[in-house]
Image: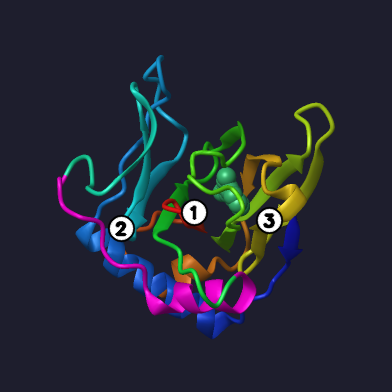
Amino acid sequence: MIFLLNSLDKNSQIKIIKDLSKIIYKSPFFTPTLPRFNKPFKIKISNAGKWGWISNIQGYQYVEKHPETKKNWPEIPSSLLYLWQKHCCKIKMPDSCLINLYSFPNSSLGLHQDNNEKDLTNPVLSISLGSNAIFRYGKNKTNLNEICLKTGSICILKDSSRLYYHGVKKIQKVKENIIDECDFDCFPKNCRINITLRKFEG
Ligand code: MD6
Ligand code: FE
């Protein structure tokens, strides 16, 4: 697992937050539920790109339409495609952009692997914005490392770390939250946003 801590400067973060607000306007956040049990996740999500990742009683799936608006997901903004090209790959572009919204203080994300994609040799890139995440990761569920992901940090799963387990133990409020400074109604105060870029189709 590669961590590029505090990699994005303030202006690039603000541009991404603006681009996200446009996505959320067309494609509102919704609460996914756990496969089989249908219990709600402690985060909200939305997507951009051809394929959006969702979870419901039926399982984890990549789908072409928002489950509530029934519309196609908006396009992945160039501010994010640029980061994929810079850090992952110049040739194959991502076709899926998952936006996770963590509200303070009660959001968290269970330990999981990203393994629903068709070709697991393609990397996954994530961007953290807003409040801090106490992020856990490791090759096995039993031997986990912990790291604080601050706003502007990038994380890449590739090669031998592609199937590492990872999750968010808790959210830590920060003094100056860049999402609050942008002042969009679609994001709650003290929240954290994590964006994951992936290639679902080969
Ligand atoms: C999060 N991140 O940071 C959750 N997945 O909120 C992920 O699930 C994740 O950070 C794949 C690659 C990087 C990640
Ligand atoms: Fe993940």
Along the polypeptide, which appears first: circle 1 or circle 3? Answer: 3
CA distance for labels 2 and 3: 22 Å
Question: How far across and how far down the image is residue 179, in percent?
Answer: 47, 66
**Type of the residue with mark 2:** Lys
Residue topped by disc 3: 158
- Residue drawn at x 40%, y 56% is 96
| Disc 1: CA contacts within 10 A as few (<14), some (14-19) or many (>=20) | many
Which secondary structure lies at badge 3?
loop
Question: How far across and how far down the image is residue 21, in percent?
Answer: 32, 67
- Residue drawn at x 22%, y 48% is 65
Along the polypeptide, which appears first: circle 2 or circle 1? Answer: 2
Question: How far across and how far down the image is residue 127, in percent?
Answer: 57, 63
Residue topped by disc 1: 191
**Type of the residue with mark 3:** Lys
- Relative to residue 40, is residue 83 drawn left or right? right
Badge 2 vs badge 3, beta-carbon distance below 8 Å: no
- Residue drawn at x 74%, y 49% is 161
CA distance for labels 1 and 3: 27 Å
- State yes or no: Cβ of the residue under disc 1 lies below 8 Å from any atom of ligand 1: no
CA distance for labels 2 and 1: 26 Å
- Relative to residue 5, is residue 89 drawn left or right? left
Which secondary structure lies at badge 1?
loop
Q: Nearer the viewer, mark 2 or mark 1?
A: 2
- State yes or no: Cβ of the residue under disc 3 lies below 8 Å from any atom of ligand 1: no
Which secondary structure lies at badge 2?
loop
Report the magenta residues as a range: 69-88
Does residue 95 sit above or below 37 in this rendering? below
